[in-house]
Amino acid sequence: MRFMILLKSDESNDSGRAPTEAELTEMAKFNEEMVGAGILLTGEGLAPSSQGARVKLSNGSATVTDGPFTEAKELIAGFWMIEVPSLEEALSWVKRVPGPDQEIEVRRVLEAEDFGEAFTPELQEKEAKMRAAAAERTDG
């Protein structure tokens, strides 16, 4: 099963404060442990909300609001995508995330079988081709 681990933002990291060398070293060590365990698919930190935007889609129109956003606790600071056999194993890794007090959300990534009969073989084939094209773009 794939899980997305979402690191919640706070005022400190949404202010644009760069991590210290010690914090980066500690996070790199944790990432290396996940790579060594064969579970890390990808992971990234995100720029502060001041460098982003929110888009609200409604009735065929789009409203764009530039950051920063006032509620930093509702923002995402970064993420990992891991593949482990169960939620319990995902949680065991999350409990080891280095750094200060923080809130972390863990969500299972939906797979084809989660969509039932509505995800027809034709749609699955189309999805597989799209994913292969995207992977080729990022690998090449």
Image (cartoon, rainbow, N blue to C red):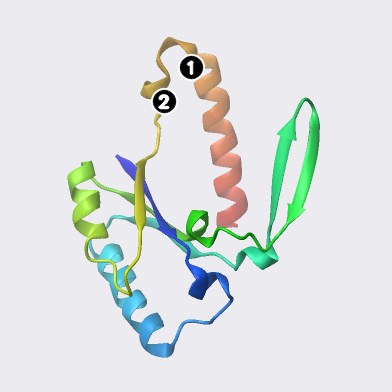
Q: 10 Å neighbourhood of mark 1: few (<14), some, or many (≥20)? A: some
Whether residues under marks 1 and 2 lie with C-beta atoms below 8 angstroms apart, the answer is: yes
Structural distance between the alpha carbons of marks 1 and 2: 7 Å
- Element type at marker 2? helix
- Element type at marker 1? loop
Q: 10 Å neighbourhood of mark 2: few (<14), some, or many (≥20)? A: some
What amino acid type should be assigned to the residue bearing mark 2? Ala
| The residue positioned farthest toward the right in the image shown | 61
Residue corresponding to mark 2: 112
| Image x and y of residue 8, in percent | 44, 59
Q: Earlier in the sequence, mark 1 or mark 2?
A: 2
129 lies above or below 6:
above
Residue 120 visible to the viewer: no
| The residue positioned farthest toward the bottom in the image shown | 21
Q: Which quarter of the figure is the N terminus placed in?
A: top left
| Image x and y of residue 49, in percent | 63, 63
What amino acid type should be assigned to the residue bearing mark 1? Phe
Give the label on residue 24, or none.
Answer: none
Q: Which quarter of the figure is the C terminus placed in?
A: bottom right
Residue 13 visible to the viewer: yes
Q: Residue at x 29, y 72 (%)?
A: 98
Q: Is residue 104 left or right of residue 125?
A: left
In depth, the one of 105 and 109 nearer the eye is 105
In depth, the one of 139 and 75 nearer the eye is 75
| The residue positioned farthest toward the top in the image shown | 117
Give the label on residue 119, or none.
Answer: 1
